[in-house]
């Protein structure tokens, strides 16, 4: 009789419906920009209402029940982190880089987020990332492609609880091992940022503080690594976007530029190029017993831009801040980032982050006009190509067929109603 009671009172397990969708962005083919998406889903079956266990309502039955142990199976519950219109999604874009020959000269990537809604408490309109593209081109010397592309870039979403983050970063390596240092930054920096974001409160100042701590951790890890950083290093330009909040951090001469439209197109530099031509940068170097001067030919003629030296014609650095370059840091070169903050407005349309392969031959104003022209023609997928092609043409014309490595990220902002 007791066994029969236990049999009657044992509750059947209840399965909670859970939808988990994983979206993977495929690597693009050379010269093509794509946002093809494939998805896989796994849905648990739901127990029909008719099979749900009965409810104990009377006091006598409740007392009888207390004499027996109810065996309930523990069920795992899935809680969606982001909401789409009809489903739940967790985006995990794959790396777009490839080591194959067809990807060696050009690397490009585009991702579009259609219908993505930011979970928010208030019903307001705010700018958000709707798509972004990136492309990198290896440099040339006298018409011959270089052995390594020392540029790298990061363009990806970061997810923290129910908040929406995007990280856009350009690194421009220099020196014999510059490509190794910029690649190392690409591999470890996103994880450092995500780790710090777990403890932030999401105000602009909090985001800047998290980014500052991430960069400090990064510079320490590069310095402590086995990479040969004595005469090699990298720039770092980072833009972190969370809803309508944007924070930019910069070390070196890569640059971030905002394109806005309010009757006419305008530009705003979000970062300053760290070069020894800047008065405050030059003074810091001189106070640290560094030398700011041009390289010189055997005839004593000035060659190229102003550089930072310990002794003339011995490993001069064309920037005043960098990651790595341990010897240059002994005489005034700094790894301290400069920050800027901004609440994005509805007229802020796009962001350009690029290495000096763009900025040495194209001004910020010209870059914004090139992207705006493509946008007005409904050809925003060609923006990176337009910038790189124009920069390449100018490099070859001005520098006898020699071209620097060129890397660019273009991010488009839109306005969405938040629920």
Image: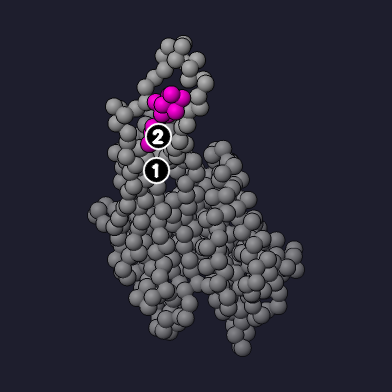
Residue 94, given in percent of the width and then of the height, sits at 40, 60
Q: Which residue is mark 2?
A: 13
Residue 61, given in percent of the width and then of the height, sits at 44, 15
In magenta stretch: residue 11: yes
Residue 215, relative to residue 115: is it above or below?
Answer: below
Residue 290, relative to residue 202: is it above or below?
Answer: below
Q: Residue at x 35, y 52 (%)?
A: 23
State which region is magenta: 1-15
In magenta stretch: residue 158: no
The residue lying furthest to the top in this view is: 59
Q: Nearer the viewer, residue 393 or 405?
A: 405
Residue 317, relative to residue 418: is it above or below?
Answer: below
Q: Residue at x 47, y 49 (%)?
A: 158
Pointer 1 or 2: first along the chain: 2
Q: Residue at x 31, y 53 (%)?
A: 39
Residue 221, relative to residue 144: is it above or below?
Answer: above
Tag count in the figure?
2
Occupied quadrant, residue 11: top left
**What colouring does the structure picture have?**
one colour
Q: Helix, strand or loop at disc 1?
A: strand
Tell me: 149 left or right of 230: left
Q: Which residue is mark 1?
A: 128
Q: Residue at x 64, y 56 (%)?
A: 217
Tell me: 409 left or right of 309: left
Disc 1 versus disc 2: distance between alpha carbons? 42 Å
């Amino acid at each position: 009789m007791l066994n029969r009671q236990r049999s009657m009172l044992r509750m059947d397990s209840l399965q909670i419906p859970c939808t988990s969708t994983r979206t993977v962005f495929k690597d693009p083919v050379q010269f093509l920009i794509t946002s093809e998406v494939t998805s896989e889903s796994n849905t648990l079956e739901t127990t029909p209402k008719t099979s749900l266990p009965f409810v104990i309502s009377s006091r006598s039955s409740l007392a009888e029940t207390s004499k027996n142990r109810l065996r309930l199976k523990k069920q795992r519950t899935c809680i969606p982190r982001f909401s789409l219109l009809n489903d739940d999604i967790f985006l995990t874009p794959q790396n777009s880089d490839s080591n194959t020959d067809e990807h060696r000269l050009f690397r490009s990537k585009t991702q579009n987020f259609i219908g993505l809604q930011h979970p928010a408490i208030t019903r307001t309109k705010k700018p958000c990332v709707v798509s972004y593209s990136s492309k990198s081109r290896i440099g040339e010397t006298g018409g011959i492609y270089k052995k390594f592309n020392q540029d790298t870039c990061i363009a990806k979403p970061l997810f923290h609880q129910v908040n929406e983050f995007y990280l856009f970063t350009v690194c421009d390596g220099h020196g014999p091992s510059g490509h190794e240092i910029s690649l190392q930054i690409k591999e470890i920096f996103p994880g450092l940022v995500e780790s710090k974001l777990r403890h932030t409160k999401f105000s602009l100042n909090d985001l800047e503080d998290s980014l500052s701590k991430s960069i400090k951790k990064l510079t320490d890890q590069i310095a402590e690594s086995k990479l040969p950083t004595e005469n090699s290093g990298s720039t770092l330009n980072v833009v972190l976007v969370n809803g309508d909040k944007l924070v930019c951090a910069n070390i070196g001469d890569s640059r971030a530029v905002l394109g806005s439209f309010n009757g006419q197109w305008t530009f705003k530099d979000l970062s300053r190029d760290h070069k020894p031509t800047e008065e405050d940068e030059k003074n810091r170097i001189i106070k640290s017993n560094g030398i700011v001067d041009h390289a010189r030919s055997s005839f004593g003629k000035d060659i190229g831009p102003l550089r930072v030296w310990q002794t003339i014609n011995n490993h001069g650095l064309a920037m005043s801040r960098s990651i790595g370059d341990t010897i240059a840091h002994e005489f005034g070169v700094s790894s301290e980032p400069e920050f800027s903050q901004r609440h994005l407005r509805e007229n802020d349309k796009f962001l350009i982050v690029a290495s000096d392969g763009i900025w040495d031959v194209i001004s910020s104003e010209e870059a914004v006009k090139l992207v705006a022209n493509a946008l007005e023609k409904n050809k925003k997928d060609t923006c990176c190509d337009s910038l790189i092609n124009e920069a390449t043409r100018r490099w070859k014309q001005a520098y006898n067929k020699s071209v620097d490595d060129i890397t660019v990220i273009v991010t488009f902002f839109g306005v969405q109603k938040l629920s």
